[in-house]
Image (cartoon, rainbow, N blue to C red):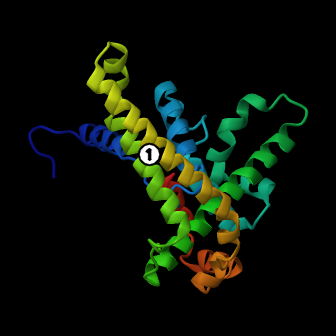
């Protein structure tokens, strides 16, 4: 029912504006262990600034790449590219179409990109598994001691950085304090050097992640593949 003199066209325009403002939501919670989120941030900034939402590869393309792999299988790059549901994946490569090795460039990029996504997905599942097992860092572990000392160095340097200027300006009390701080930093760095020397042997004794999580990488990939069915074609078309 139309109100206040609204016409069907007005409602249609309003709906289009609303849809255009909806933000695309897709994430892989890899805990910052891969470069994926740094890439997404840079790519999305470039896509927003240039207003080339489809021509510059970013998070949205990664979503549809994964959807294509689920539907067609791993490394079936040509089948994925030829599927109209995943036409968005072809947009970033339109400028390369005249190059002789166009298909090779495209397929290599898709393979590299999927490898990064797969790595991030595996880490996401490992983190979920670690949370489920209520695993936490051992504060007494040597690697944690190194981390603590680094935090102390950073805090000490930042909280006393003004002393160097005051010392250079001829402030004798500041100069005395600065020398004490530098002595503390020297001792902390010496301790860190000793920790780093022992670290390789310490890490070598740590059981592999798969053992601690009681889940191999193959099991993780199997869980990822079977977690949820792909949306039906008509739903995919609406989301894209």
Q: Could you tell me if residue 61 is visible in this image? A: yes
Q: Position of residue 209 (x, y in %)?
A: 63, 76
Q: Which residue is situated farthest in the right direction here?
A: 100
Judging depth in this view, the residue of 219 and 240 nearest the camera is: 219
Q: Is residue 20 above or below residue 72?
A: above
Q: Examine the image and state in which quarter residue 16 appears.
A: top left
Residue 156 position within the rendered picture, expressed as x and y whole percent measured from the top left: 37, 42
Q: Is residue 103 left or right of residue 189?
A: right
Q: Residue furthest bottom?
A: 214
Assess disc 1: are there few (<14), some (14-19) or many (≥20) residues with their C-alpha within 10 Å of its C-alpha: some
Q: Quadrant of residue 116?
A: bottom right
* Residue nearer the viewer, 214 or 227: 214
Residue 8 higher or lower than 99, as above or below: below
The x and y percentages for residue 217 are 68, 76
Residue 131 falls left or right of residue 67: left
Q: Is residue 27 visible?
A: no
Looking at the image, the residue that sits furthest to the left is 4
Residue under numbered circle 1: 153
Q: Is residue 240 left or right of residue 84?
A: left
Placement of 213 over or under 104, stated as above or below = below
Identified at 64% across, 55% down, the residue is: 65
Query: For numbered disc 1, what is the local secondary structure?
Result: helix
Instruction: Please provide percent x and percent y for residue 163.
Output: 33, 26
Q: How many marks?
A: 1
The residue depicted at 49 percent of the width and 28 percent of the height is 51
Instruction: From the viewer's side, name the closer residue of 12 and 46.
Output: 46
Position of residue 15 in the picture relative to residue 187 (left or right): left
Residue plotted at (16% across, 39% down) = 6
């Amino acid at each position: 029912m139309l109100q206040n003199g609204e016409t069907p066209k007005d409602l249609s325009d309003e709906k289009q504006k609303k849809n255009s403002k909806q933000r695309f939501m897709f994430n892989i919670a890899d805990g910052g262990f891969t470069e994926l989120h740094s890439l997404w941030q840079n790519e999305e900034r470039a896509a927003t600034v240039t207003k080339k939402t489809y021509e510059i590869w970013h998070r949205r393309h990664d979503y549809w790449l994964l959807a294509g792999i689920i539907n067609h299988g791993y490394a079936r790059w040509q089948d994925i590219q030829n599927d109209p549901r995943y036409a968005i994946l072809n947009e970033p490569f339109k400028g390369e179409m005249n190059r002789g090795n166009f298909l090779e460039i495209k397929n290599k990029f898709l393979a590299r990109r999927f490898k990064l996504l797969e790595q991030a997905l595996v880490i996401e599942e490992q983190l979920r598994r670690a949370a489920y097992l209520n695993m936490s860092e051992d504060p007494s572990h040597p690697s944690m001691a190194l981390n603590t000392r680094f935090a102390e160095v950073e805090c000490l340097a930042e909280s006393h950085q003004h002393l160097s200027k005051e010392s250079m300006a001829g402030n004798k009390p500041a100069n005395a304090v600065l020398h004490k701080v530098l002595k503390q930093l020297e001792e902390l760095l010496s301790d860190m050097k000793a920790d780093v020397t022992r670290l390789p042997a310490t890490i070598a004794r740590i059981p592999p992640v798969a053992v601690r999580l009681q889940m191999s990488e193959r099991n993780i990939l199997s869980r990822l593949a079977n977690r949820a069915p792909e949306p039906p074609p008509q739903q995919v078309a609406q989301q894209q």
